[in-house]
Image (spheres, rainbow, N blue to C red):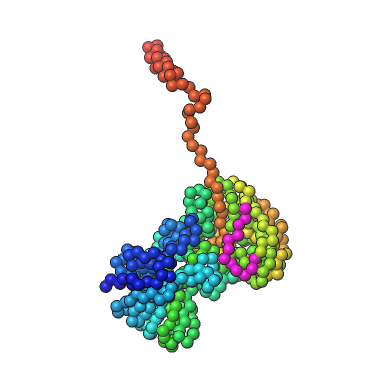
Amino acid sequence: MKLDIPENLLQELIDKYNIISNTFIDRDIIEIHNEFETEIGDVHSEGFQPQIKIKRWGNECNASFRLIDDDLSTPQIVVSGDKIKFIKNKKEVHFYKVTKEELGNENGGYEMEIILKEKPATNKIEMSIETKGLDFWYQGELTQEEKDRGATRPENVIGSYAVYHKSKRDDYSKRGGKNYKAGKAFHIYRPKIVDSNGWEVWGELNIENKIQTVTIPQDFIDNAVYPIRHATGETFGYESIGASDQSIASSTNTFRVGNSFTGAAGTIDTLHAGGLNLQSGSDTIDITVLVNIENTVTDSHALTAKVERLNVSLDTTAVDWFVFTAASEEISAISYILNILGDPADISTNARIRFDASGGSGGTGKIYSEIVAGGYVTLRDEDPWTETDFSNTRAHSLYVTYTPAPIVGPVNIKTKNAVPRANIKTKIKKVFADIKTWNKIE
């Protein structure tokens, strides 16, 4: 049965969406080289579908999530305030925006909230997934090694997925391309399910073989007061900054951390660090971002660029990109380490940068790290940098903006020293005459 969007929509909703083929298309575009676009429904389907599709970078990458539904009752589509509601007998699906203040990120996000009106037959809720050009990286518990080296991960990020471009990162807008920043497309947070009495539990999120499954604890399914909300969580954070924290300085130690990436021929304009924050309070701190040539044989990495900013103001928020202006250092299509450190003498708490665990693709590579008691100046000026590798891979919220190398074109033959065409013809005739003469001699 075809399900049509109601004609009497509120002006508030009309202002926020373009409506095409029973699909709501979000009008928000964050910036020209780094756009987010959201579709509620499916423009390729005749009627409305309980689906959300997120597009990044002009639809270079996208992902769609559609509820796999065993409720065969006739659905309704209802618009209430700023929410789009897909209503059936046993469940409802609500679509609505979430502000950046609610999510604590750069750009807010979107919620696809599933409401169970009665106890379901199973404690698993599934969605089909179609993707283009994206990797889904599971954010598990931190290893002891990571904790020892200054990493922390919030509770709602443990068991979540960071979604990244399969192969691209950095800012290519000056090369006629896009700004991929650190390559992050969006984040799918760990689901927290809540019943009508306020009982909350974490769900288990798993993405495999184009199916997303949320497993709800069976005890909660059996004893919750229905309806229950946020049955799959399904909060999509529209963010380019990582969701976990890595120390770059504590009150006693300097942490120099980074990960490998492949450069591009040109010069470095700016280096960018995302989500710099303090664990508590507010303060200023000296921070340096560096680019070193990666040497996996000796683990001794020669310096290419170093930019220090003094008295950088930080607080507990982690939603901004900080810019470090370079001196047009040359860079090429080889492997580098983009890394960062802070001065512990300036603070009494932890200064941190954001990151996500990665699968090692999408331009991210293995982690490089060194921890020194005090020692900011020594570690900042170490060239080459010799460090200790991590045993896993990570995407720190760091990226580079390039100016492309000049394109060397074909030589212009129309120069002041060019031989006139008539002279060229004369010389060609002379060559053929000499050949004939030589043949006669032979």
The extreme left residue here reads 1
Q: Name the residue at 48% across, 68% down.
A: 109
Of the pair 14 and 387, the residue shown nearer to us: 14
Which range is magenta?
314-325
Q: Name the residue at 59% across, 46% down.
A: 330
In reply to whether residue 16 is colored magenta, the answer given is no
User: Is the residue 408 above or below the residue 38 in the image?
Assistant: above
The extreme top residue here reads 441
In the picture provided, is 325 more to the left or to the right than 395?
right
Of the pair 234 and 335, the residue shown nearer to us: 234
Give the x, y percent position of residue 17: 41, 66
User: Is the residue 117 above or below the residue 405 in the image?
Assistant: below
Q: Name the residue at 51% across, 40% down.
A: 407
Can you say which quadrant of the picture contains the N terminus? bottom left
Q: Would you identify the image quadrant in which residue 54 lies?
A: bottom left
Total numbered badges shown on the rendered structure: 0
Q: Would you identify the image quadrant in which residue 232 lies?
A: bottom left
Give the x, y percent position of residue 150: 62, 68
Residue 294 appears in view? no
Give the x, y percent position of residue 71: 32, 79
Q: Name the residue at 35% across, 64% down.
A: 20
Residue 328 appears in view? yes
User: Is the residue 97 above or below the residue 180 in the image?
Assistant: below
Can you say which quadrant of the picture contains the C terminus? top left
Give the x, y percent position of residue 301: 62, 52
In the picture provided, is 35 more to the left or to the right than 152?
left
